[in-house]
């Protein structure tokens, strides 16, 4: 259960809907969608589908049960003066677009320049997961990850770049497979110091910062 902590801004999880429907209501909703699609939810192959979908939803959207600030809570100050960039790249994630509820598959690159504190590197991956496993738009997710890191670690700067393919563009609508959307959010030294930003971009294999959509 996510805690509400006033003043922690972006590290807070999204507010939850006031009343969570029951599992039976969720499964009924799936039956309705099956009928809407034109099939019969009572036929053998579809009989267990509503419960499978409900279980899948628990997995797809488990980020709502995670407080991102909790993920980062345990930090280490014994860094022996380490003040170079910490980068975790190619963090694979699966999310769902909040407009069409279809998968968004991509990878995130997350970096920070420590000031006093560092965090276990697996926590960066868990932070990405906490925001990915929700209904999302890529721009918001990019900003949320950066803001949570900035707020909890208070480093000299944070950089987050996300590259993702949106199935709402590849399997429906404009049907454009192979299109990747790239978003970035830079704070502090990554925003203000071109050489820091260049170092980060070359580590993650992005040389041209101009083509990034800054959020
Ligand atoms: Zn979409």
Image (tube, helix red, strand yellow):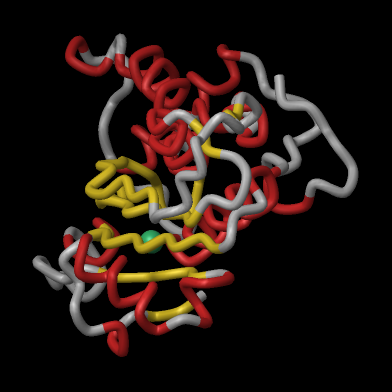
Residue at the farthest bottom position: 210
Q: Is residue 45 above or below residue 181?
A: above
Residue at the image position 79 percent from the left and 27 percent from the top? 3
Q: Based on the displayed image, in which of its 4 quarters is residue 92 positioned? A: top left
The percent position of residue 72, horizontal first and vertical second, equals: 59, 32
Residue at the image position 52 percent from the left and 82 percent from the top? 192
The percent position of residue 141, horizontal first and vertical second, equals: 50, 55
The percent position of residue 172, horizontal first and vertical second, equals: 22, 63
Residue at the image position 34 percent from the left and 33 percent from the top? 34
Q: Quadrant of the N terminus?
A: top right
Residue at the farthest front position: 80
Q: Is residue 91 above or below residue 50?
A: below
Taking the image as shown, residue 45 lies to the left or right of residue 144, namely left
Q: Is residue 207 above or below residue 61?
A: below
The percent position of residue 24, horizontal first and vertical second, equals: 57, 12
Residue at the image position 77 percent from the left and 52 percent from the top? 9
Q: Is residue 142 above or below residue 104?
A: below
Taking the image as shown, residue 191 lies to the left or right of residue 91, namely right
Q: Based on the displayed image, in which of its 4 quarters is residue 35 positioned? A: top left
Residue at the farthest right position: 6
**Quadrant of ligand 1 in image:** bottom left
Of 180 and 22, which appears nearest the observer? 180
Of 37 and 213, which appears nearest the observer? 213
């Amino acid at each position: 259960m996510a805690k509400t902590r006033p003043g922690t801004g972006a590290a807070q999880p999204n507010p939850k809907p006031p009343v969570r429907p029951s599992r039976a209501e969720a499964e009924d909703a799936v039956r309705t969608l099956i009928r809407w699609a034109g099939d019969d939810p009572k036929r053998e192959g579809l009989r267990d589908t509503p419960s499978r979908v409900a279980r899948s939803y628990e997995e797809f959207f488990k980020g709502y049960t995670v407080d991102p600030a909790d993920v980062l809570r345990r930090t280490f100050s014994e860094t022996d003066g380490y003040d170079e960039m910490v980068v975790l790249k190619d963090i694979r994630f699966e999310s769902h677009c909040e407009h069409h509820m279809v998968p968004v598959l991509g990878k995130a690159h997350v970096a920070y320049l420590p000031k006093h504190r560092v965090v276990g590197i697996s926590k960066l991956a868990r932070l990405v997961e906490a925001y990915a496993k929700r209904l999302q738009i890529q721009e918001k997710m990019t900003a949320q990850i950066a803001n949570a890191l900035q707020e909890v670690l208070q480093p000299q700067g944070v950089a987050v770049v996300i590259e993702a393919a949106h199935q709402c563009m590849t399997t429906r609508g404009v049907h454009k497979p192979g299109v990747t959307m790239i978003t970035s959010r830079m704070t502090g030294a990554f925003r203000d110091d071109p050489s820091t930003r260049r170092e980060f971009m070359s580590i993650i294999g992005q040389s041209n910062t101009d083509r990034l959509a800054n959020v």
